[in-house]
Amino acid sequence: MIVVAGAGKLAVELLDALPGMISAKVIAWADAAMAKGPCVVVHAGSGRELDSIVSYCNKTASTLIELATGSLIASHATNFPVVVCPNTNILMLKFMAMLATSGHHFKDYNIKVVESHQADKSSVPGTAVSIASSLGLPSDKIQSVRDPREQSDAFGIPSEYLSRHAYHRIEIEDPVCKISFETKVFGRSPYAAGVAQIICAARSNALENRHYDIMGFIEKGWL
């Protein structure tokens, strides 16, 4: 059984989309008492329920997939597997894994990282922070854009996705050469599909009672 915890946009999208993507019953956190035995808990909330979720997973030996950016899960005593996911789009994760492995080669170049998300996103842009870290760029140098007009004009974000998108542009240059990377994730499907794959990977492998970074799943070839 899959339990989705959270009341925000992502949690609602997961509750709607996951039943058609995974061969397991999907229920909301409010109905967690229905689950018998170990299950997979997907935390897509703000953190208000984290204490209760940790207690539940400890009691039931359930696996926790932590999607919340800036989560305090590391400060909790856990006796169950925890998979920390700063991003759930699998292609994007593989790109980030490549940067984590090779980003240090660019430490002596001029680097610029720009990120754009929907106007109501107030949380720390975890993917952009990870990208900047891999390239040796301080997180306070990341340029964030939330203005819909600029998103449309400068980045070409289609109007139907202004309310739900993740855009990143990376520029690396020296006086005679410039390399640019651009990533675009539109709508909800890439996130839900990625979460479904992460759940399947967690259920298909014997996880130890410790914390896993989702990049470890990429490195092991589980995704």
Image (cartoon, rainbow, N blue to C red):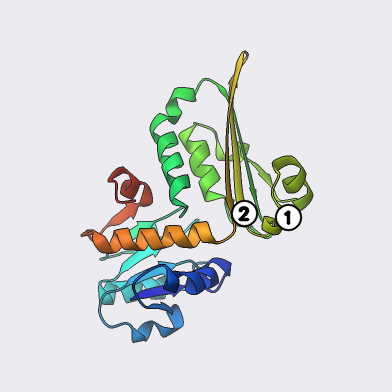
What residue type is disc 1 on? Answer: Ser
Q: Quadrant of residue 77?
A: bottom left
User: Do residues under tags 1 and 2 come within 8 Å of each other at their CB atoms?
Assistant: no
For mark 2, give the secondary structure: strand
Q: Where residue 33 sits in the image (x, y, percent)?
A: 36, 85
Q: Is residue 215 left or right of residue 81?
A: right
Circle 2 packing at 10 Å, graded few (<14), some (14-19), many (20+), is some
Residue shown at 72% from the left, 47% from the top: 151
Residue 23 as seen in the image, left or right of residue 182: left
Farthest top residue in view = 176
In the image, what residue occupies the spot 27% across and 65% down?
80
Q: Is residue 48 visible from the viewing direction of this image? A: no
Going by the image, does 75 lie left or right of 184? left
Height in image: 109 above or below 204? Answer: above
Secondary structure state at the residue bearing disc 1: helix
The CA span between labels 1 and 2 is 10 Å
Rendered view: 47 above or below 134 = below
Q: Residue at (54%, 74%) from the top-left corner?
A: 7
The answer to whether residue 106 of the structure is visible from this angle is yes
Looking at the picture, how far across and down is residue 120, in whole percent? Answer: 68, 60
Badge 2 amino acid: His
* Residue that numbered label 2 is attached to: 165
Q: Which residue is mark 1?
A: 159
Indicate the position of residue 57 as horizontal and vertical percent values: 31, 72
Q: Most extreme residue toward the front, as rendered?
A: 20
Mark 1 against mark 2, which lies toward the viewer? 1
Q: Residue at x 59, y 59 (%)?
A: 187
Q: Position of residue 184 (x, y in %)?
A: 59, 46
Quarter of the image with the N terminus is bottom left
Q: Is residue 123 left or right of residue 216?
A: right
